[in-house]
Image (cartoon, grey):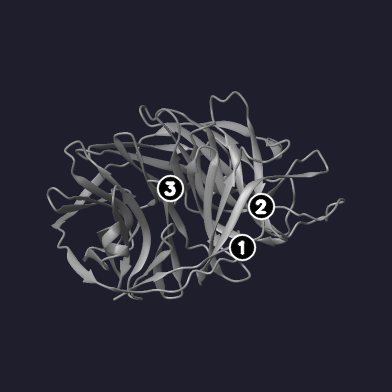
Amino acid sequence: MYNIKQIKMKKLLFLGIVSLFSIQAFSQSISSVVEDFDRLGDIYTQKIEISDNKTYILSQNGGYSEIYNVDDLLVAIFPSYLTIKDFKILGDDIYFCGTSACLGFIAKSSINDLFYNNSYSWDNLIEGQSLNEMEVYMDANQSINIACIGIDNFGDPMFFHYKESTNIYNIIKSGDTTEVFDDIILKGNYIVTIGRKSNSLRDFILRVYDKNNLSTWGRRFDNGTNWRYINRLIADTVDGNNIAVVGEAEDYGANLITIASFVDISNLMAAVSYWFGSPKYIGNYGEYKHIRDVMYSTADRKLLVLEEYPHTFASPPLPPALTDLVSSVIVLDIPGNGVLKRDMIYSYINGIDHKFNSLTEKEPYVFVATGINPQSYEVEKWEGDRMASGNNCSIMEHFDLLENNGYPNPITNVILVYSAEIKWVEKEIYNLNVVLDLICD
């Protein structure tokens, strides 16, 4: 059983996130609002979704998963045996997935039932340990489909697909035991999984599935650099038939960079990779660390990358080694924009680096990130308008990008390993109310 609670939101007295211009000595800020909820959360566990102008946040709080209905100031608190890894909104319904007692599960509810009638339906999978990332869509026959990546009972990556009209799910695995699945996105009529090879660390793998019949094809791409990936890849759709694949990489030493690769999935030909590091040295951390999320801005065709990036706000001359890894939104040009540069927006708020983990677009030029206040450990959200920065609104820290081309290679086919029926079980809950506390406005 889990609870529904009303939540309080506190507005931090801060109306500007600092952006620095690398040549000029003065600072510039974009218009921002940062708000805290009156509930604790675990660092780097937040995910955010915006649907029909309403915002929802997933967060872990100790041994509990929680889903926030931000606009209605409600939070659903799930039992400790249910760990939610991802969630999506489609229409008036909410879907989520994760792990429970070492078994993967999927769950669904209407938003109204989850937050006001205190119920949801779920089923678990005896063939998998966890479902970690998900997408939900309606196919050409108006049937709801759920697509996930996760881990099977042998610790191997799997692709999970459920079709509501048949109530059947399939589990599909790669024929290559060295392949790892990192992310899953929707692009037009396709589902795209993004992965790597554990024995070929400069490569990334794209598998494309037709949404309606699951016919599939794919390619393995060299990232075009001499750097190897060291953590999971994160992807998003961009304009046309393109997707962006972003990862952090190292040069077999202490130096680290970000690699953003752009691929046209309609033909899966050569990838264009942009890569960059920080010109500032940071102790033993290399040049930067930890990509958290990516987001495509439709208004100005920019790719926004949320990552921890080295910076100092100390007065010049700068120290020889920078020790601050600051949560930052990096704004990248994409192929076809005619320029190769990036701008930096830092979340160094009132002298404290707030740790954000997830990023999405609210409206043109406006992003929303969610994370943790490192002093109070409360869940918070940061809304930034890149077009409302007062005087000199376009001035940010600026660096050039380097460009390389990566080339495609064939990959091993996938294999259907299991099919079964979902048996939805309804769960009942109750709700509690607390008082809304306005800190400032």
In the picture, the quarter occupied by the N terminus is: bottom left
Q: Is residue 379 above or below residue 204?
A: below
Q: Nearer the viewer, residue 108 or 227?
A: 108
Q: Which residue is mark 3?
A: 196
State the mark number for residue 440: 1
Report if residue 230 is visible in the image: no
Disc 3, disc 1: CB below 8 Å?
Answer: no
| Structural distance between the alpha carbons of marks 2 and 3 | 40 Å
Query: Which residue is at 25% across, 39% downward?
Result: 211
Which of the two residues, 339 or 16, is positioned nearer the viewer here?
16
Residue 80, percent from left and from top: 36, 76
Q: Position of residue 81 (x, y in %)?
A: 32, 75
Label 2 CA crowd tier, 10 Å (few <14, some 14–19, many 20+): some
Q: Is residue 131 left or right of residue 7?
A: left
| Category of crowding for the residue at label 3, using alpha-carbon neighbours closer than 10 angstroms: few (below 14), some (14–19), many (at least 20) | many
Q: Secondary structure beneath disc 3?
A: strand
Residue at 48% across / 34% down in the picture? Answer: 298
Q: Is residue 144 left or right of residue 438?
A: left
As rendered, which of 285 and 346 lies closer to the eye? 346
Q: Quadrant of the C terminus?
A: bottom right
Q: Residue at x 42, y 75 (%)?
A: 63
At x 47%, y 42%, the residue is 203
Mark with earlier residue (1, 2): 2
